[in-house]
Image: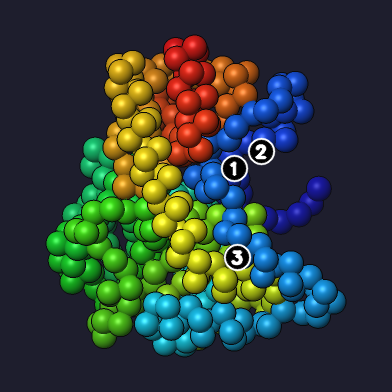
Amino acid sequence: MNVKVPDYILSIKPYEPGKPLEELEREYGVTDSIKLASNENPLGPSPKALAAMAKVMPTLHRYPDGGAFELTRALAQHLNVSTKQIVFGNGSDEIIGMLTRALLAPGDEAVLPQPSFLMYDIMVRCSGATPVYIPLKGLAIDLDGVLAAVTPKTRMVFINNPNNPTGTMITKSDMEPFLAKLPSNVTVVLDEAYIEFVQDDACAIGTDYVTNERLPVVVLRTFSKAYGLAGLRIGYGIMPAEISSLLNRVRQPFNVSSIAQAAAREAIGDTAFLEQTKALIHEGLLYLYDELQKRNITCFPTHSNFFLIDVKQDASVIFEKMLRQGVIVRAMNSYGFPHYIRINVGLPTENRRFIDALEKVL
Ligand code: PMP
C-alpha cells in the first residue's frame, strides 16, 4: 500500500480495552465468567435511565438534539455552572480528543503523568503534538515534576484525579499551589472520571477551579462509571466558555445520541442509585482489602472503584490463569507495572469469586 501516513500517527500504540466477557467465553469455553477489568458499575445502569431510554426509542428516526439543550440545562443546574461551560461527548474519551484537536498542533507539548489513562497519550499524538511523560512519585502524580516539565512549548497538562490505574488522589492543598504556578497559556485538563467514589473531603474538586480568571481549567466527568452507563457512551467537560466554543468548532454535530441524552438526564437525578453504587463499592473495597490481607497479598488502597494488587510475578501470566478461572482482570505490564494487576470492585458474589480464583492461581 502506498499510503503516506504522518510519523506521529505511526507512533501511536492502539488502546487495548479490557477483554469483553463474550470473547473470554468464546475463546476459553468457560461460562458464567465475570469481568473486573474496566472499572464498570457492577449494579448495571440506573433504572430511571433505562426507563428514559425506552421512552426515546420511537423517535429514533430523528437526529438527536445536536446542542443537547435539555440535558445541558439539567446538568448546568445540577452543577451550578453556566450552560455555556458544558460540552458533551461520546464518552469523556471524545472530549479528550476534542481538546487535543482544538488546542494542540505539531510542535506543541503536553505534559502527562505516567502511568495514567492511556487515551491522553493517544490523543496528544493524534494532533502531532509531543507527549512529555512525568513518572509517578510512588503511585501518586508528581505535581512538582509536572511543573518542572513545563516549557514555552507546553500547551496542555493532564491530571487524573483519582488517577487511573493507581487510585491515588490529589488534595485541595496540593492542587491549589500547583494551579497557581502554571503559566496562563497552558490548559489544565482535570479528569475526574472516578470523582464520585472519593470519600475524603480533602480531595480537590475540579469545578472549584473552572471559573478562575487566570488559567484555563477543563474538568472531565463521565456517566460510564458511577452512573453505570459505559455502553451508552456519554461524558462531559466543564470549562470556560471560550474553550467550549472552540470545542464546538471541532465537535461532530450529532456526537451524543438521543438515547444517551435521555438516559443521562434521568441519571443525574437518580441520587438513590448513585448512593447505592457508592455503598456497594465502599463495602466491596473493605471486603477485598481484608481478604487479601488475610492471604498476605499486597494491595494498594484506592480512592476509586479499582485498585492495584502486587502478584509478585509476571502479571500477564496471572491474567491468563485468571481467564481460565472465568475472571477477567487487567494486567498492568503495559502501564509499567509488570507485577501488578488492577481490578475493580464487583458485586459481593463477584468479589468472592475473584478472591477464590486468585488464591487458586497464586
Ligand atoms: N478517564 C479515565 C481516567 C478513565 O479511566 C476513563 C475510562 N476508562 C475515561 C476517562 C473515559 O471514560 P468514558 O469515555 O467512558 O467517559
Question: Badge 1 local density, few (<14 within 10 Å), some, or many (20+)?
Answer: few
Q: Is residue 81 above or below residue 160?
A: below
Q: Which residue is mark 2?
A: 20
Q: How many marks?
A: 3
What's under tag 1, amino acid-wise? Answer: Pro
Left or right, 150 with respect to 279, comes to left
Q: Residue 128: x and y, percent?
A: 52, 61
Q: Secondary structure at mark 3?
A: helix
Tell me: residue 306, above or below residue 201: above
**Residue 334 location (% of width, % of height):** 48, 34
**In percent of the image, x 25 and y 63: which residue is there?**
204
What is the secondary structure assignment of the residue under circle 2? loop
Helix, strand or loop status at disc 1: loop
> Are the residues at dot 3 and dot 2 in contact (C-beta closer than 8 Å)?
no
Question: Looking at the image, do the residues carrying marks 2 and 1 touch, with CB atoms under 8 Å apart?
Answer: yes
Seen at 23% across and 42% down, the residue is 137
- Give coordinates of residue 343: x percent, y percent: 46, 35
Residue wearing tag 1: 17
Tell me if residue 316 can be seen.
no
**Residue at mark 3:** 48
In front of the other: 338 or 224: 224
Q: Amino acid at mark 2?
A: Pro
User: Are there few (<14), some (14-19), or many (20+) residues within 10 Å of tag 2?
Assistant: few
